[in-house]
């Protein structure tokens, strides 16, 4: 049965599009209105989905669950973007794929190892059961989240959409993701929407499926929170931490952020990471955090001027820059060396590139750029996508750009996967700006192979552990009768965003 909703990306029957261009955020920043070219792209996709479904004698709902439905959507996006002169990149899908499942499978079907290093869920049945968060129909900020695959009569209603069960379905069953990392937000211990032991419980649930290591867990550390650095050895020993997750903008006291290269916080964090033997640090950069995690003056700490110096001084440490430093207010175009002086107030992807150059950190060194939320927003704009991805490949390195999606906030990451699987920078932009062609080999690196090095994983051992495990069998059964929700979970308006903050999210 079609799922009803009142937003424009649904067709007249209420069926969601398989590739989502919408206002949803990961809850860290207020949503922005959907740009006109994305509205037009959605409208054209809705129209074409209806036409092609009728041509194949399928319902819209059945059609969008096929690869041809995804191909139709991507081709519609191409058509609108080209008509509007947004030609920096495109989705490389043959036109035949819109009506031919075999051709669509050839372009869109799984063929890479996919390791998503930024996944989220929350302990919905405990930490998030505040009365302000619930209504008769579910979450105040998430009225669309009717989880048909969970019990709607549960004590906490549709808040279950955020649970580990929903995470496993959306991340593993309804997408091509093979492996993921569960990560954290920069709250105090009392306010954590997902605690370390709850994350470990999810990891154990997945690992119990015949022992495959499909889910890793971060250790959350806020250096300016008293006692956090001192707790790192305990976390590393007790919870099998795969890497550390931290936020330079965050300050639980709401006063100021910190830098990776300062002595009081950054240097102590790095040294303790070295002592624990877990020498990969994931740092949120770029996207601003809402109050109470930071104040307006903390935004500058989302810049990456400190990254290059810290990386140069600590070559044995891996620094994974979450969101690649991407910031919606400082998105930029091509990077021009020497155009601006580097400084602590520069924000955005360019601040990361400039910091690496200024400190002599060469591409493919010990600094990595992660794509969670960044790629989700780049999907809306072919020109910006070409510049952002082209710059990252050129200056951070083709071996150091890592796949992440920030899901479950954006629902299943399958649409992000399908979009990147067909993403191509235009010949015009490649020639003009010196950007790389996005080859199948480069995509495979980004999707998973690049992340194996900083996480200390062996590809053959990982792939071998998946063969015939319970998750692989569950994926195969799910593929026989696919029922993706095509939902998004995060806030899509300022009203929903502030309701989430009020609820303690």
Image (cartoon, grey):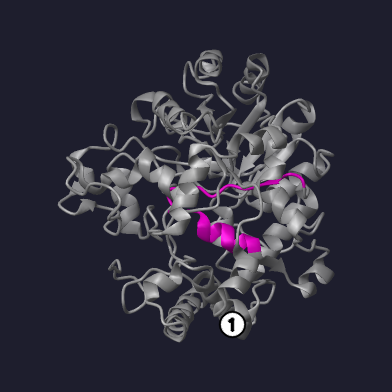
Q: Is residue 369 visible?
A: yes
Q: Name the residue under label 1.
A: 79
Q: In this view, does 350 lie to the left or right of 131?
A: right
Q: Does the magenta stretch include residue 411?
A: yes
122 in relation to 479, above or below: above
The picture places residue 112, in percent across and down from the top left corner, at: 66, 52
Choose between 95 and 290: the one closer to the eye: 95
Range of the magenta residues?
399-421
Q: Say which residue appears at 65% left-offset and 66% top-offset.
A: 422
Tally the numbered discs. 1
Q: Can residue 290 be seen in this view?
A: no
What is the quadrant of the C terminus in the image? Answer: top left
At x 47% / y 33%, what residue is drawn? 209
Q: Nearer the viewer, residue 206 or 27?
A: 206
Residue 77, x across and y down, in percent: 55, 76
Q: Where the N terminus falls, by quadrant?
A: bottom left
Callout 1: helix, strand or loop? Answer: helix
Residue 466 colored in magenta in the image: no
Crowding around mark 1 (Cα neighbors within 10 Å: few <14, some 14 to 19, many 20+) is some
Would you place residue 336 above or below residue 45 in this image?
Answer: above
Residue 289 % position (x, y): 47, 44
């Amino acid at each position: 049965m079609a799922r009803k909703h009142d937003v424009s990306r649904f067709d007249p029957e209420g069926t969601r599009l398989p590739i989502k261009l919408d206002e949803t955020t990961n809850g860290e920043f207020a949503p922005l209105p959907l740009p006109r070219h994305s509205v037009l792209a959605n409208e054209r996709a809705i129209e074409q989905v209806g036409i092609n479904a009728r041509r194949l004698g399928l319902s819209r709902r059945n059609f969008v669950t096929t690869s041809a439905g995804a191909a139709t959507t991507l081709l519609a996006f191409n058509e609108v973007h080209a008509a509007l002169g947004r030609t920096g990149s495109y989705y490389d899908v043959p036109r035949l794929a819109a009506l031919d499942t075999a051709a669509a499978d050839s372009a869109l079907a799984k063929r890479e190892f996919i390791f998503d290093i930024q996944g989220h869920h929350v302990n919905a049945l405990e930490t998030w059961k505040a009365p302000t968060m619930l209504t008769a129909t579910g979450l105040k900020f998430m009225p669309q989240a009717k989880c048909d695959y969970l019990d709607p009569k549960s004590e906490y209603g549709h808040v279950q959409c955020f649970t580990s069960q929903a995470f496993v379905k959306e991340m593993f069953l309804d997408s091509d993701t093979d492996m993921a990392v569960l990560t954290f937000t920069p709250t105090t211990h009392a306010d954590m929407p997902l605690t370390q032991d709850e994350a470990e419980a999810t990891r154990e649930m997945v690992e119990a499926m015949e022992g495959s290591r499909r889910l890793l867990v971060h250790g959350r550390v806020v250096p300016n929170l008293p006692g956090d650095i001192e707790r790192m050895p305990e976390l590393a020993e007790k919870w099998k931490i795969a890497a550390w997750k931290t936020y330079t903008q965050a300050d639980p006291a709401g006063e100021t952020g910190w830098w990776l290269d300062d002595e009081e916080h950054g240097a102590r964090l790095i040294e303790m990471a070295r002592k624990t033997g877990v020498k990969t640090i994931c740092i949120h950069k770029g996207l601003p955090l809402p109050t109470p995690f930071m104040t307006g003056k903390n935004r500058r700490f989302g810049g990456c001027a400190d990254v290059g110096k810290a990386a140069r001084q600590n070559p044995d440490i891996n620094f994974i820059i979450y969101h690649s430093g991407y910031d919606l207010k400082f998105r930029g175009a091509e990077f021009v060396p020497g155009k601006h002086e580097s400084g602590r107030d520069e924000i955005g992807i360019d601040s990361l590139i400039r910091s690496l150059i200024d400190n002599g950190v060469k591409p493919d060194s010990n600094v990595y750029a992660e794509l969670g939320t960044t790629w989700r927003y780049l999907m809306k704009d072919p020109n910006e996508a070409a510049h952002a991805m082209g710059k990252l490949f050129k200056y951070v390195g083709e071996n150091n750009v890592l796949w992440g999606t920030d899901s479950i906030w954006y629902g299943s990451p399958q649409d992000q996967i399908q979009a990147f699987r067909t993403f191509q920078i235009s010949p015009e932009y490649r020639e003009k700006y010196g950007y790389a062609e996005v080859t199948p080999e480069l995509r495979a690196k980004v999707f998973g192979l690049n992340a194996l090095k900083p996480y200390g994983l062996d590809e053959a051992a990982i792939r071998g552990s998946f063969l015939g495990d319970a998750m692989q069998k569950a994926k195969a059964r799910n593929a026989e009768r696919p029922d993706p929700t095509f939902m998004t979970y995060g806030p899509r308006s300022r009203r929903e965003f502030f309701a989430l903050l009020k609820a303690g999210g």
